[in-house]
């Protein structure tokens, strides 16, 4: 199966503008292994492991010490190392597209440290589309900003945190890094977790005439008239524009404008029998 037939390949990259598109296409990163048809080791389903060169930690016990070696030998690349653009990598791995899609698998990026190649990963996601799962095997020795960018494109994270004990997490015992290196990750996910919990609590307890919900999203209207219109539609699905205008206290043109906006945003629909159907749900 070829994703190009689905319009996946290059579609978004092309839209990114010529200069940006050319820059993304020319991004080349060093890869020392592409291992196909893996199961049970790198996330869900059938995966292809793509191993990058380089890692800031340089652990003494590194399983892939070759990732720390120089990329070049003399004038050329060292044996076994490929310098690939996102599109070239896609061309190499797409052979297993059908296995990825049938099993919920995809590409696992490891190495080496994949977070060093955030732009490459973003470009690759644009090229492969959303049907493959992307997994990162990472030590998370990267910035908060990098994690925030990757969170939008990575489906699964396999995190090697070494140790949370600073007495163990020292250069003498392994990783040439301090716990500070992964603090960005901890901060990011703690914030994410707190926001998520807070959101669910608000979903359960927040009440108000002006607070509505749509697919688990909170919708709060600035104008009181919007909630009045919605409440009237909720109570009287067959209410007319004239009646809405009279009860809300604004002219029919203004009612019409608000209804158009509510419809465009998917908050309401007009059913076949001309009754109003609310997609948003009230909080009271
Ligand atoms: S974090 Fe992983 S890839 Fe990096 S040096 Fe340590 S063991 Fe090797």
Image (cartoon, helix red, strand yellow):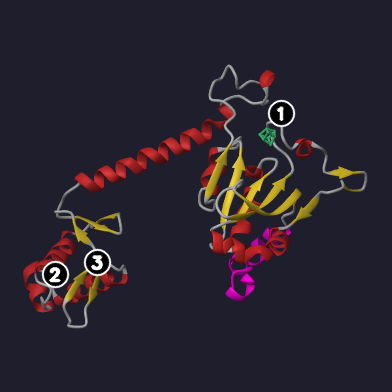
Residue that extends furthest to the front in the rendered view of this protein: 40
Residue 145's spot in the image, x, y percent? 54, 42
Q: Is label 2 within 8 A of ligand 1 (CB to nearest ligand atom)?
A: no
Towards the viewer: 66 or 29: 66
**Number of marks:** 3
* Residue 217, disc: none
Q: Earlier in the sequence, mark 3 or mark 2?
A: 2
Q: Which residues are magenta?
A: 1-26
Distance from Cα at disc 3 to Cα at disc 1: 56 Å
Discs 3/1, front: 1
* Residue 233, disc: 2
Q: Residue placed at 69% from the left, 65% from the top?
A: 95
Q: Residue placed at 55% from the left, 64% from the top?
A: 102
Above or below — where is 273 with respect to 284?
below
Determine the secondary structure under disc 2: helix
Residue matched to label 3: 279
Residue 135's spot in the image, x, y percent? 58, 49
* Residue 61, disc: 1
Horizontally, residue 153 falls left or right of residue 85, namely left
Horizontally, residue 222 falls left or right of residue 44, namely left
Residue that extends furthest to the right in the rendered view of this protein: 74
* Quarter residue 89 falls in: bottom right
Above or below — where is 214 with respect to 114?
below
Residue 218's spot in the image, x, y percent? 28, 53
Residue 155's spot in the image, x, y percent? 52, 51
Crowding near the residue tagged with mark 1, few <14, some 14–19, many ≥20 C-alpha atoms within 10 Å: few
Q: Is label 1 within 8 A of ligand 1 (CB to nearest ligand atom)?
A: yes
Discs 1/2, front: 1
């Amino acid at each position: 199966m070829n994703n190009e037939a689905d319009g996946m390949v290059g579609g978004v990259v092309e839209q990114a503008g010529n200069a940006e598109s050319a820059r993304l296409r020319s991004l080349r990163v060093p890869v020392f292994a592409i291992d196909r048809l893996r199961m049970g080791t790198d996330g869900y389903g059938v995966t292809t492991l793509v191993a990058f060169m380089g890692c800031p930690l340089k652990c003494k016990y590194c399983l892939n010490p070759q990732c720390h070696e120089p990329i070049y030998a003399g004038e050329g690349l060292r044996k076994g190392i490929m310098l690939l653009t996102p599109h070239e990598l896609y061309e190499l791995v797409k052979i297993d597209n059908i296995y990825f899609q049938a099993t919920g698998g995809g590409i696992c990026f490891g190495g080496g440290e994949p977070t060093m190649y955030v732009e490459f990963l973003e470009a690759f996601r644009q090229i492969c589309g959303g049907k493959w799962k992307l997994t990162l095997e990472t030590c998370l020795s990267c910035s908060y900003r990098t994690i925030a960018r990757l969170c939008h494109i990575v489906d699964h994270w396999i995190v090697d945190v070494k140790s949370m004990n600073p007495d163990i997490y020292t250069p003498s015992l392994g990783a040439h890094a301090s716990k500070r290196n992964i603090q960005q990750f901890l901060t990011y996910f703690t914030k994410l977790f707190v926001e998520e919990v807070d959101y669910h609590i608000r979903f359960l307890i927040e009440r108000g005439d002006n607070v509505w919900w749509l697919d688990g999203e909170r919708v709060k209207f600035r104008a009181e008239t919007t909630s009045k219109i919605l409440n009237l539609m909720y109570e009287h699905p067959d209410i007319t524009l004239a009646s809405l205008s009279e009860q809300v206290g604004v002219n029919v043109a203004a009612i019409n404008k608000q209804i158009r906006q509510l419809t465009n945003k998917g908050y309401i629909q007009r059913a076949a029998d001309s009754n109003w159907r609310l997609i948003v749900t009230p909080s009271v």
